[in-house]
Amino acid sequence: MKNKRAWLWMMVGPAVLLLAGVVWAADTGTITGQVLVDGKKGAGVSVTCEGPLGQAGHKVRRTASDAKGAFRFEGLAPGNYRLEAIKSKCSTKRLSVRLVDGKSLRVQIKLTTLPITGALSSDDVMMEKSVDREEAPMAGLAAGATAPVSATKSSPHKRYRRSKAKKGRGRRGPPPPSRRPPPRPRPIVKKPPSVAVATSVEAKGTEQYVDHGVRQWVDASKDKLSTFSIDVDTASYTIARRKLREGRLPPAASVRTEEFINYFTYNYPAPKRDAFRVSLEATPSPFEKNLTLLRVGIKGREVTNKTRKKVHLTFLVDTSGSMRSRDKAGLVKKSLRYLLDQLAPGDTVALCTYAGSVREVLPPTPIRQKAKIHKAIENLASGGSTAMSSGLTLAYKLAYKNFKGNSVNRIIVCSDGDANVGRTKHGDMLKSIKHYAEEGITLSTIGFGMGNYKDHRMEQLANKGNGNYYYMDSFEQAKRVFGEKMMGTLQVIAKDVKIQVEFDPKAVKKYRLVGYENRDIADKDFRNDKVDAGEIGAGHTVTALYEVDVTNPRAAWATVRVRWKKPQGVKASERAFPLKSGMKKTSFDKTGADFKRAVAAAALAENLRKSPFAESWTMAKARRLAQKALKKENKEELELLELIKKSVVLMGGK
């Protein structure tokens, strides 16, 4: 009997094993493909594979195309999958495919470089809810089949270095009117995008955001220097907060990781002599083994009410029809009234508006006439189309008329950014703003509203105006910006602040700066003082995170250099800060709450902007880090944890 069974197994065993192999192979398949950009092999394109849709084991996988544009996803269960390809300055493409048991599916994705048009002549624009979708046939795609894809909308991935050389600076301080009147800013308005733009009522789905991509790993042996401008703006975080609290994810292009990190307050040591102090700390990464996180922290010098400069503000308020809602015109009035209550004797306020035409509502008025100023703000009414450039012309006229030396001379623009009436080019307006900033009249932008919001325009204006860019999603945010953070908002302590980190190629294999994609500066321009950079206000903190592959942890593998000018200065100063052994932690758990909070905020942003690195910087880890950084009754930290939890739910996680 035993011999009979053995003989039977010898006869059918191989067939059983073969059948088992066939059954096992049928469980998984492979999706491979190639990305073409303008018909050429697309390297460094972010490719996402999501699926199987509606089935157990649903997962989001990410990779980047190689030098030949090829990508590959293995071990996939049969079912429906959604592919997405993203590259900077190019269209985005989404493709739905069906994977059959044990089959290999090959697809081809074609992207095109976006045309440069209108007011956004230097950047690509993402319109919320406007990604073009092409549904590929769900059946009939067997092994070796190709699904061609042509793409149309924008969202990028890879970053490239680019020079930001600017024109030389003029002399400081506006000249006397009789000797040298400043050039009038020429009115300009962008050509509207190819979607409906609001004039008298708020349009839906016409928000504009520019996707600046995601920084990739840099080989330290080929490029040991990382150079960028500081950024203290926080608008990206508050835009995301509003959308998450309304139950929807923010557009990936609206998420700027550095603004999520820098929204929070960090307890860095205060400077003793200089305008700011730099703090460095390195620790093993909580996300990837054998990787290190480097934190560069900057703390600006504090200024008190007694020592601060006098403030001369010109409010430029958008009163066009698109601002006719509580979260716009209503919140503008509340915010400005609150700011007035923070001003002191000697400060002045002027007010002008723009819609179909511009209007001087209030000439420069001393703050002691607060009731008069409050009444002027309260009487603002919305209606008409938008002529932002003409409004800026009037605002600069008022600011110039009231210009005071050794004081803060600032224009504050309150708008949804939806300007659609004007006669000159967008670039000309930015040049005028930059000129006035060099002459001592700076400009900040405060964003309001949703639906037709133009984030990129508001950010550009503030960047050229050497001011801040904030977004108001609530009156609580107004109190934070104009109350708790007012000194940092209005009192600049250093301008053109650049950071350059040098990594030792003998001790570092590769590195990656997290965020700051649109703050990139060419390495050669670090000491080129004609190249513009960011400003830091009194008491501000700035944080940058690097992910580093360190091969010799005992070495002094990084040196941070900071270069800056005084607020009215022309000559730059520079200091170097080496990473010393005492700044290196042996475990991430040994880092303080500040470090954990910064990393948690970065991880949230990386996931919301669909970064390929989010596969390891997971939301689960972000939530644990936020919980570890939590202090009792700290509103900011509780809020971060809240937003992480909301994001997990909206992303379909647990």
Image (cartoon, grey):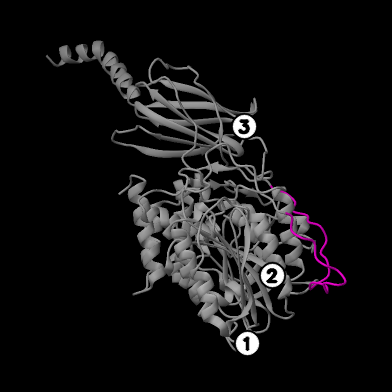
Q: Which secondary structure dominates the residues rendered in magenta?
A: loop
Front: mark 1 or 2: 2
In primary-sequence order, the first of circles 1 and 2 is 1
Q: Tag 2 or tag 3, which sits nearer the N-term?
A: 3
Three-letter amino acid code of the residue under disc 2: Leu
- The x, y position of residue 166, in whole percent, is 78, 56
Q: Quadrant of the N terminus?
A: top left
Q: Nearer the viewer, residue 392 or 582?
A: 392
Question: Spatial distance from mark 3 to mark 1, Cα to Cα?
Answer: 56 Å
Is 405 left or right of 175, judged from the image as shown? left
Separation of marks 1 and 2 at Cα, in angstroms? 26 Å
**Local crowd at mark 2 within 10 Å, few (<14), some, or many (≥20)?**
many
Q: Nearer the viewer, mark 3 or mark 1?
A: 1
**Residue 250 shown in magenta:** no
- The answer to whether marks 1 and 2 mark residues whose Cβ atoms lie closer than 8 Å is no
**Residue matched to label 2:** 398
Judging from the image, what secondary structure is the residue with disc 3 in?
A: loop
- Of 564 and 180, which appears nearest the observer? 180
Query: Which residue is identified by label 1?
Result: 307
Position of 121 relative to 514 (above/below): above
- In the figure, residue 116 lies in which quadrant? top right
What residue is drawn where x is 58% and y is 72%? 489
Mark 3 and mark 2: Cα distance apart in space: 51 Å
Q: Amino acid at mark 3?
A: Gly
Which is more N-terminal, label 1 or label 3?
Answer: 3
The x, y position of residue 574, in whole percent, is 75, 71
Tell me the magenta residue range. Answer: 161-186
Residue 600 place in picture, x, y as percent = 44, 60
Residue 52 makes an appearance in the image: yes
509 or 609: nearer the viewer: 609
Q: Which residue is mark 3?
A: 42
Q: Is residue 71 shown left or right of residue 427?
A: left
